[in-house]
Image (cartoon, rainbow, N blue to C red):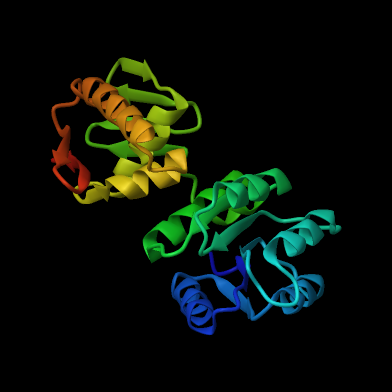
Amino acid sequence: MADMKLLIAEDDPNLGQILKEYLEIKGFDADLARDGEEGSRMFRDNSYDLCVLDIMMPKKDGFTLAKEILKSANPVPFIFLTAKSLKEDTIQGLKIGADDYITKPFSMEEFLLRINAILRRTKSGQYFEDNSKISLGNSVLNYDQQVLAFNDQVISLTSKESELLKLLIQHRNKVLDRKLALNLIWHDDSYFNARSMDVYIAKLRKHLKMDPSLQIITIHGQGFKLVDSK
């Protein structure tokens, strides 16, 4: 992961420095640009694996910078940061080609999870471990094939079931915050999506009954916990 180089374009000096230092602690090489023009110049002069772009920046906004990145000889994935929660900004960002979108304020854990998820979907994922097969209890999740296996029993999962189970495994024996899960998988924590997630949790509970060492419990007011007693 030490070879992964990220560009952060954020005009808030405090937030920008916090993000840079946090990513460096997590093993990334991170450059910080204080405005859109500096970000554009740094992108031209360096090679990056992913860019984190604030939308509202002086001299050049994040949307303009993102379009330059996409038109460059070596386009890379990018994620938008914004203090706004306007649906219009979200739609515009996605239309431009953003790989993800996160609204301030956000947790560092959520920020890191989103970055890692994007990098695993791109060719830059070569720097990560092979996470296609993940052990849980006495079972194995094949994330790429969306299959859960326990002894000679094999269950096919939907993409949402597979994503949600993987996120639960990453937080095994800890509470997975409900809002975090909704934002990472559904990209929206609306009432409708929350009800949808409850349906998928119920389906996963049914699937995991075949493995006595596993249980998903609800932590009221917080989220869910995958208990792995193996």
Give me the residue at 30% from left, 15% from top: 153
> Which residue is at 62% across, 78% downward?
32
**Residue pictured at 59% horizontal, 44% vertical:** 121
Q: In this view, does 102 lie to the left or right of 201?
A: right
Q: Where is residue 42 in the image (x, y as percent from the top left)?
A: 75, 76
- In this image, 95 relative to 101: left or right? right
Q: Where is residue 16 in the image (x, y as percent from the top left)?
A: 53, 78
**Image vertical order of residue 217 relative to residue 22, above or below:** above
Count of numbered labels shown in the rendering: 0
Residue 111 in the image, given as x and y percentages of width and height: 45, 60
Image quarter (top left, top right, bottom left or bottom right) of the C terminus:
top left
Q: Nearer the viewer, residue 93 or 208?
A: 93
**88 to the left or right of 132:** right
Q: Evaluate whether residue 230 shows in this view.
A: no
Corner quadrant of residue 30:
bottom right
Q: Who's the residue at 33% across and 32% down the image?
A: 197
| Between 223 and 230, the one nearer to me in the picture | 223
| Front residue of this view, candidates 80 and 20 | 80
Q: Can residue 229 be seen in this view?
A: yes
Find residue 228 and report its image quarter: top left
Q: In this view, does 114 lie above or below 55?
A: above
Above or below, 57 against 119 in this view is below
Position of residue 190 measured from the top left corner of the image (x, y, whole percent): 38, 39
Q: On the image, which quarter does residue 95 sit in?
A: top right
Q: In this view, does 125 lie above or below 55?
A: above
